[in-house]
Amino acid sequence: MKRTLIISFFVIGIYSCVSKKKFAKLEEQNTIVSTEKANLEDLLGRITFVNDSLIEANVTLDSLLEVERDKNYVVTAKEKGSGTRYANKKSNINKDEEYSKKAAFVYNFTTLVSWPPNKSEFFIIGVLGHSHISSFLNKFAAGKFIGGKKVIIMPLHSVDTYCHILFVGKDQQKQFQKIKKSIATKPTLIITENVYLNEIGGHISFYIDKSKVSFLVNKYAIEKHGLLVSASLMSFSGQ
């Protein structure tokens, strides 16, 4: 009996040593796995950060390339004479008369272009920058309604506010790319005073021919913004 107990304790001791060794080995393996996992997670985080940075850089590069393409297009158009017959017309009209006529046109465009339904309480004509047209637009729009919405003439310093019509003043023409990008998905009619801008996304652009105020229409660009153009507007255009 005593001998049996001694053998049993001996066997238990051996198993105990083996179990401790196995446990120590398993613990060591678990530490290695945990370390490798942490290293992999760190590497994945670094790859994700680099990937996000590359995506952001790519977006910025695409934006810069778009701006340069449009600049080159305008320069090329000028060199080839595209639009020159409109841009280089002589003006015999004074400033008040010019902007009075432009304001009348802008107001009448509201009957020649159709906007999709929206929840806006007012029909907003925004004037971006400092322009002589604002006072004349206010006279034409005073007390008027379009599609049941009261007409509001809104002076703007940015395009954060939605407008049905956006008149881009001459002092804002250099910002046209940013302006166009900011309202790319909005049903906004963009009106400028530079016929070359019509070639790169402007909708309607005014030009002066002696004492006559005329305009060009970019039907494709207008319809791309979800607006409908009447045949009458195209017939009035100087194209």
Image (cartoon, grey):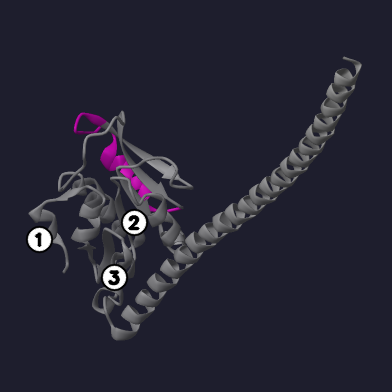
Quadrant (top left/top right/bottom left/bottom right) for the N terminus: top right
Q: Nearer the viewer, residue 211 or 149?
A: 149
Which residue in the protein does label 1 denote? Answer: 235
Residue 54: image x %, image y %? Answer: 55, 61
Q: Quadrant of residue 207?
A: bottom left
**Identity, as a three-letter code, of the amino acid under mark 2:** Asp
Say the numbered circle drawn on residue 92: 3
Q: Earlier in the sequence, mark 1 or mark 2?
A: 2
Q: Quadrant of residue 176?
A: bottom left
Q: Residues within 10 Å of mark 1 (few under 14, many from 20)?
A: few
Bounds of the magenta span?
130-149
Q: Which mark is nearer the camera, 1 or 2? A: 1
Instruction: Give the Cα separation between the discs numbered 1 and 2.
Output: 26 Å
Q: Which mark is nearer the camera, 1 or 3? A: 1
Check the image and name the residue furthest to the top: 1
**Identity, as a three-letter code, of the amino acid under mark 3:** Asn
